[in-house]
Amino acid sequence: MLTQIRNWGTFVVSALALFWLQPASAVRHLDFWLPCATLALAAVVWVWTLPVFEAANRREVVVDVAVLVCAVCGVALLRDVPALVGVLTRTPPPEVAAVALVMVLVIGACAAVGRMRGKAAWAVGVAVLIGLLLLQKYAPATEVASGALRVLQGQSAAHASAFDWRWFGFSYVAFRLIGVLRDRVIGRLPAMRLREFVTFAVFAPALSAGPIDRPDRFLKDLRAPYTLMAPQFFAACERLLLGVFKKFVLADTLALIALSDAIAPHLRPGWAWLPVYAYALRIFFDFAGYTDMAIGFGMLLGVRLPENFNAPYLKPNLTQFWNSWHMSLSQWFRAYWFNPLTRALRIRGWEPAPIVLLGQVSTMMLIALWHGVTANFVLWGAWHAVGLFVHNRWANFARERLSFVNERPALQRVVNMAGAIATFHFVVLGWVWFALSTPSAALHALQALLFLPGLR
Amino acid sequence: MNERLRIFLKALAAYVVLNLIMLAGAGPTPAGLSVYNTLWPGRVRLPWGERPDLAYNLSLGNLDAMFASHEIAVPKKDDEFRVVLIGDSSTWGFLLKPEETLAARLNAAEMQRDGRRVRVYNLGYPDFSLEKDALLLHHAMAYQPDMIVWLVTLRSFPRDAQGHALTMANMAEACAAVGRTCEPRVRSLLERTLWGRRREIADLARLQLFGAAWAASGLDQYYPTQYEPVQRDLERDEKFRTYDRASGLPRVDLTFDAFDVAAHSRVPLLIVNEPMYISDGANSDVRYNFFYPRWAYDAYREMLRDEMRMRGVRYVDLWDAIPASEFTNSAVHLSPRGSQMLADILVRDLER
């Protein structure tokens, strides 16, 4: 009984959290329609990935759809309760009739899509999700989309801006859905009912900053009997408080002096490292804090979300750094991009070095573009791709030649420490590309950091 | 005992002890906690910032902490002739980089006085209030100035314009600075605990943290890429605050008594009527600028000159010394070139 309540509660709350957390938009009703689109995409992908479309338990489907429709209509109905307008959505939702009509269309689309199956269809699904991600990440495309939506709503397109289109949580939802489609192709996707699938895709604690879970693992927790004993409760609270401390005390304090476009042009050689160190620590504590909060909330709901960080700044080399920084994202790329690509290249008889180079460059580029389609993110990705490739080659070269280091623990410790310091500074210099908006601002900052007068 | 419970109890005990220390008034002084002039270089002007996120600076009411963050907190050298500049945002250097302020320009002149090297400290602070200036000067006396240069303008004088946040936060010292006695505000028990002083402590911590940004960039204010230039065309309005030509500008309504703090200090004082923008646009026959109708400003200049003569204080009237083209976004904010021109004039007065 308790498990049922938890499952239904998590399902409904996660769906409603999409509306609650969605930022306001200058495009009329967009802050209502974007969460609806997230739910509709999840529903479509669920239908698409059912092992056999007709095999779904009809009663379960009807109940799940009815609850979801009631939740969305409930949000729309709040427009008629003046005291509650602004509680779940930033602006008044559209007419309930329009919402109902759209939902009928979505259900019809689900029924139609359910019959279009096969690898080609799923590939189209992945392409659509990537297209939507690009639309969100590439500012000129976002502006065009915003202009079109404004025209549709009878507003002037002249004021269209990328800020109109801030699709809350979609970066993570899209990756979960793409992963699901890929798992379906390779036959690894477990059967899920709609309620479970939507809960997985839009799980409230992991909406804003991940982690990106795997469906089989998530489902195992969701189907396990739910109990919340005192030790589990206190452990969850401890994790939550740790997250709050990291995010709101450490990260937000460091943000005051962290590297930014405002301070970058004024950096002075020597002291310039302070804002860059502050940025490096700030981004870690910010992200790790959110992850701790997500894991803590997940534990309260009986779901053990995957860890995202494992002391990344203490790692002795860049490969280990990427194995411990935003781990769920790097594991996602390893599983769905790097491994299939390198496997395919090996089968085609490529040499190891070009395989590693292509695999690492393409993976880092995709990770960079996932953050945003800008020159600086690309440069940040290239920075790490080159670093990873150089480390890979160095590790290959040194494996036998420097094996004596492994036999001397003291020397090993010194090498590891030196490696950790060098890796940390390589990553810190990489953040300069990431934190600033233009290559020239980043070059100016690097000039101050590295005492390079010629770059000015 | 459970490890976590033990940690919690220890933290609770530490919190209680810290509160008791605060209640007893035995906590460390803000000046003692400052890492400026040790870890970070001292600031060249007092901390002030309306948008901390952009300015890497903040406004706070704690005078000890403000002065501790300033370069004036460094012990005075034997060969130093210490000059403090007191004034409004014009002296502080609104829209001017640290090296462009009046104090920086005067230091660049490398003056000598009585065989000592003249070192000028910028203790200007934005907003117009003579009582605020007097408060800062009163506090600055602990730093052994050899000369005070106080830049003033009419807007700082009216009695009803004196309610500055800094004077409110330091009422007892502000009163002492202008020779009044005020009952010091007694903090309640709660206000004396860590919780009650959380804002003060947070401001102090942020001030120390912003020192890193100051050290790294020299940024201490937000420089907008564009700003509204000083208004050239003016309304045909002869009012200055509530006064008009008929009522005149009663001397009793102006805070001349704020100068007492300087008089009591026995440190040589130079009062400067600061330069202002003089418009040649619409209605400039009625007003000098957005701030002042001509009649009020002329009356003020006369009163200020008489007051300084009566007090026997050196006084220079530079009201029209800088051309209109060298003002930025207000009638008293100077451009970098204007700041240099003012410094060139004042060098002569400082070397005398």
Image (spheres, coloured by chain):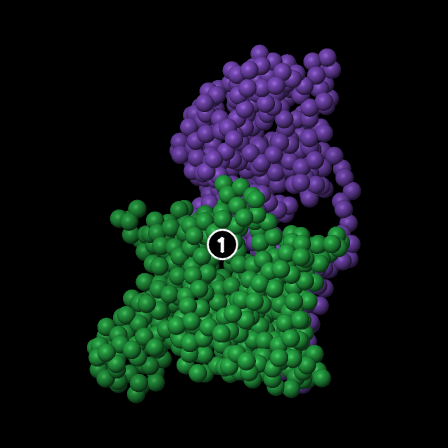
Chain colours: A green, B purple
At 59% from the left and 55% from the top, the residue drawn is A31
- Please name whichever residue, A416 or B312, is drawn nearer the observer in this view of the structure: A416
Q: Give the answer, above or below, for where B258 lies relative to A346.
A: above
The spot of residue B226 in percent (x, y) is: 47, 35
- Please name whichever residue, A315 or B259, is drawn nearer the observer in this view of the structure: A315
The spot of residue B90 in percent (x, y) is: 53, 31
The spot of residue A219 in percent (x, y) is: 56, 81
- Please name whichever residue, A220 or A391, is drawn nearer the observer in this view of the structure: A220
The spot of residue A184 in percent (x, y) is: 45, 79
Q: Quadrant of residue B296?
A: top right
At 51% from the left and 35% from the top, the residue drawn is B94
Q: Quadrant of residue B257?
A: top right
- Please name whichever residue, A123 or B214, is drawn nearer the observer in this view of the structure: A123
Element marked by disc 1? loop
User: Is B133 on the left or on the right of B275, as rendered?
Assistant: right
Q: Is residue B8 visible?
A: no
Name the amino acid type tagged 1: Ile
